[in-house]
Image: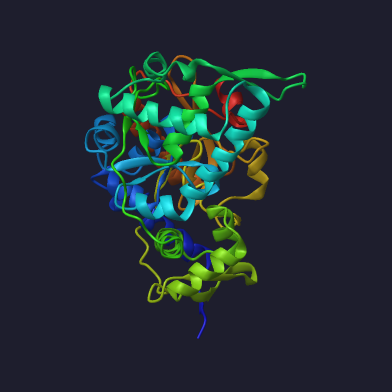
Amino acid sequence: MVTHLTDGQRRVRLAHRHLLHPAARATRVEQVADALVGLHATDAATVFLSANARLAEPSTAEVERALYRDVTLVKLLSMRRTIFAVTAELAPQVSAAAARAIAAKERATLLKHLATGAEGWDERRLAQTERAVLAALAERGEATTAELSEDVPALKETILMSPGKPYAARQSVGSRLLRLLASDGHMRRCKPRGSWLSSSYPWALVPPWPDVPVREAKAAVIGRWLAGYGPGTLADLRWWTGWTLGEVRTAVADLGAVEVALGGGATGLMLPGDEGELPSAGPWAALLPALDPTVLGWRERDWYLDPELVPALFDRSGNNGPTVWWNGRVVGGWAQRASGELVWRLLGDIGAEGEAAVAAEAERLAGWLGGVRVTPRFRTPLERELTA
């Protein structure tokens, strides 16, 4: 029998599974990453803001502990060629399922750029330079790109990008090669030399991960997604992973996923035994950052995001800005002014109870941020308007 889950029931699941209701909040950041499969890390601030929106006691130190001291969170260029911070436990599966293939494409692209925009570079010299970088990093223990460039001068050489075009520009070999080594799982970003918002960070070596078969790894990643985001459609899964439809179908079949009927006549997928309803935990509000995993968790978003709000809350490339939530729906946006003041705007009527709950969450977030000011990497119309 096909189970039916209403949009309202999906929003209840979201409150529980994404740790957004106050009663569901986590005590450790690893719990948050596992619940969401991974935290978006393209913008360094998102990891901290997404985690602390779901921690019972928000703490910058707690996120830094996992990222830099215990290294129980690892950043990988993976699904959809996006950087995710995933738990060290899940990292081997994410690497095998997504990161390896992306790294192979990155390597081919770099070799192409070196062949057309630099002199004296080929696959052999690239491999030699990589070995020299890893040896230098092993000697130093931790080093910035600039420091490694002193040990390996080849990193200072430049590549002419888009030669012959009006927008041609030069990039250092080091900026591209170190990112490639990180994509390959050889090195990781360490604690920034500055605030937690800084993009100036050193590198360190990463111990080899267990080798996981690709098919097994893809099933593991899809299983984690279904556990946290299910039910979802094949279109949701294909979009979120960036894989082919065939790869998604194979992983779903390997898991024995079951079909459920969703609103609007869509067919969703869930893990076996997970079809039941969850009890409502009561009303809740949340302020989530730009690129938060919940906002970007599904391709088909009408059940939690009114399409009419998209132009205000998303940029032209599909990146979302900071959002305000009430009972499982996006209802507005928020921002920080130059003074550090946190401001928000509702894009619909949510009643006095909803407004009071949003105000309380805004106060909670402002209290955690203190004097720190966060500007999203990808700015959206509403965020710009609120900070004007």
- Residue nearest the observer in this picture, 376 or 138: 138
91, 287: nearer the viewer = 91
Q: Residue at 57% x, 57% y: name it.
A: 243
Question: Which residue is nearer to you in this view: 280 or 351?
Answer: 280
Classify residue 136 as left or right of residue 346. left
Give percent across and percent down for residue 100: 47, 48
The image quadrant of residue 273 is bottom left
Residue 141 in sight here: no
Quadrant hosting residue 235:
bottom right
Residue 179 position, x and y percent, is: 47, 32
Image height check: is 124 above or below 76? Answer: above
Residue 119 appears left or right of 185? right
Q: Quadrant of the C terminus?
A: top right
Left or right: 36, with 57 as reference point? right
Coloring basis for residues: rainbow
Residue 114: quadrant of the picture: top right
Examine the rendered structure and indicate whether residue 60 appears above or below residue 74: above
Reply above or below: 335 against 31.
above
Can residue 112 be seen? yes
Residue 167 locus on image (x, y percent): 73, 20
Q: Nearer the viewer, residue 102 or 132?
A: 132
Q: Position of residue 319 (x, y in %)?
A: 59, 38
Q: Is residue 319 left or right of residue 95?
A: right
Q: How many marks?
A: 0
**Rendered view: 311 above or below 239:** above
Residue at 44 percent across and 65 percent down: it is: 219
